[in-house]
Image (tube, helix red, strand yellow):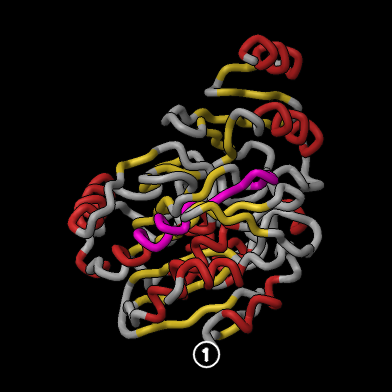
Amino acid sequence: MNFKETFLKLTEYTIPYGEEESLLPLLPKNLIKDKWGNWYLTIGQSKTLFTCHLDSYCKDKVKVNHVIEGNIIKTDETTILGADNKAGVTVLLYLIEQNVPGTYYFFISEEPISSAGWMGSGRLSYGNPKFLSQFDRAIAFDRKHYGSVITRQMAQFCCSDEFADALIEDFKKHGVDLKKDPTGYYTDTGNFIGIIPECSNISVGVWNEHHMNEYVDISYVEKIAKAAAKINWENLPTVRKSGPWLKDESSPKSGKIKKYLNHFTSRKDSKLWDKVYKILSDPYVLMNQGEFESGKEMWFNDWFDEKPFKVVIDSGKILINDQLITIKQLEDTFKEEQ
């Protein structure tokens, strides 16, 4: 594969949600389209899921004017580049070309700018958890900069230290230095934490994603791809226990699949929950997989630290870690913290 040429073709246009299919001529011919609009293929017998996403952080499909300075590819700053996540697409295309065993998923609508946050990977996790449960590990190539193996995203640990350490050691054998990084927010593998034991995201040399000054070091994309092709993915340890952060009757593993409604519900106390959720959802992440119900324990956690706390709303009363609190007290507390 000519990495630079492949990447330039993939980023000829910005690809908003809804335009992902225009990339099909550049992808493998034997891809299968799932019922949610994602594409995938399987090579050999493997418990490894490799992922990337096809869409870019943009609202319109427009021509990209590339500016190339050695190994650095950027734009004339009239558009984004789309290296997020065409760098990851490039890696997956190379692994497929090298016939590395695994299931390869090309997701749509990872970026929330046009899809209202209803991601293709999220649709898969809710719609077909049984399919995902066959995998021991899920690897996205969607992390910025150099050197990260994401160990935490969606405000929870997504892979074990043993898995991350083994992966880092294997990459080091093939000339790539990585380190554990607990500062991830979200990529597609974040939707699989409750189903697949070991989930991570690996750096692919992208800077300033979502901005006009976005750029990629294509030599690093090549370095990551070639090292990844030599990893014995099936020999990596599986230590972390899969399953939702909280056991919830509406979690994907239960079979009682529901939409993740958060506060969008007409149930008792829903208006009060709406206010509480609005206050808490900026600094914290709601961990429950199901919708709000009066009297139900709703758990929040910090993005980067293990600081879970419980919220219960029942008959107009708010309890945080079993302590009664008013909306005004809650608002005042977070004004002070900010």
Confirm whether residue 116 shows in the render: no
Q: Indicate yes or no whether the magenta region holds residue 219.
A: yes
- Name the spot of residue 260 as percent of width and height, x first: 66, 54
Q: Secondary structure at mark 1?
A: loop
| 277 lies left or right of 216 | right
In this orientation, which residue lies closer to the viewer: 24 or 338? 24
10 Å crowding of disc 1: few (<14), some (14-19), many (20+): few
Figure quadrant of the N terminus: bottom left
Residue at image point 49% right, 39% down = 155
Residue at image point 65% right, 59% down = 66
Residue 225 occupies which quadrant of the picture?
bottom left
In this orientation, which residue lies closer to the viewer: 267 or 303? 303
Residue at image point 54% right, 67% down = 7
Query: Magenta segment range?
Result: 210-224
- Name the spot of residue 274 as percent of width and height, x first: 76, 35
In this orientation, which residue lies closer to the viewer: 199 or 242? 199
Residue 20 occupies which quadrant of the picture?
bottom right
- Name the spot of residue 112 as percent of width and height, x first: 70, 52
Residue wearing tag 1: 30
Figure quadrant of the C terminus: top right
Q: Is residue 333 above or below residue 296?
A: above
Residue at image point 57% right, 78% down = 39
Confirm whether residue 68 shows in the render: yes
Tag 1: amino acid: Asn
- Name the spot of residue 16 as percent of width and height, x first: 74, 62
| 161 lies left or right of 34 | left
